[in-house]
Image (cartoon, rainbow, N blue to C red):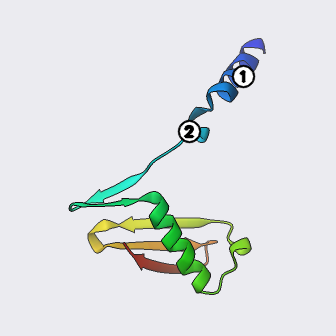
């Protein structure tokens, strides 16, 4: 029990993977696109399609660099895609 508490305290102090700052960049054929840019474009497209931001519970992204497209599924129901 004491060891488990020590491990939990260590995770809180260091942050662990979940709290770590992440920088994801998609590279393909000489282009670079940051994760933040992809997410922002998808968000804008979803909002423009009439879905309210508060109604978004889950988004699945399928990035296909060979097609230069990002396909998405919102709440396991509505689908769409944007260009990279």
Q: Residue at x 72, y 22 (%)?
A: 9
Q: Quadrant of the C terminus?
A: bottom left
Q: Residue at x 35, y 57 (%)?
A: 26
In the displayed structure image, the side of residue 38 where residue 69 appears, left or right: left
Q: Residue at x 60, y 40 (%)?
A: 18
Q: Position of residue 81 (x, y in %)?
A: 45, 78
Which secondary structure lies at badge 1? helix
Which secondary structure lies at badge 2? loop
Q: Which mark is residue 9?
A: 1
In the displayed structure image, the side of residue 50 where residue 36 appears, left or right: left
Please identify the quarter of the rendering in which residue 65 is found: bottom left
Query: Can residue 78 be seen in the rendering of this structure?
Result: no
Q: Position of residue 33 (x, y in %)?
A: 36, 61
Please identify the quarter of the rendering in which residue 55 is found: bottom right
The number of callouts visible is 2
Q: Quadrant of the N terminus?
A: top right
Q: Which mark is residue 20?
A: 2
Query: Can residue 33 be seen in the rendering of this structure?
Result: yes
In the displayed structure image, the side of residue 59 where residue 7 appears, left or right: right
Please identify the quarter of the rendering in which residue 67 is found: bottom left
Q: Position of residue 19 (x, y in %)?
A: 61, 39
Q: Is residue 40 above or below residue 52?
A: above
Q: CA distance from mark 2 to mark 1?
A: 16 Å
The residue sitting at the top extreme is 2
The residue sitting at the right extreme is 1
Question: Callout 2: few (<14), some (14-19), or many (20+) C-alpha neighbours within 10 Å?
Answer: few
Answer with mark 2 or mark 1, whichever residue precedes in sequence. Answer: 1
Q: Position of residue 48 (x, y in %)?
A: 58, 85
């Amino acid at each position: 029990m004491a060891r488990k508490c020590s491990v939990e305290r260590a995770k809180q102090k260091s942050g662990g993977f979940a709290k770590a700052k992440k920088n994801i960049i998609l590279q393909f054929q000489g282009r670079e696109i940051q994760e933040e840019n992809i997410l922002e474009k998808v968000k804008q497209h979803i909002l423009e399609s009439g879905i309210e931001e508060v109604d978004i519970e889950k988004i699945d992204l399928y990035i296909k660099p060979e097609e230069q497209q990002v396909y998405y599924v919102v709440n396991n129901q509505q689908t769409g895609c944007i260009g990279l």
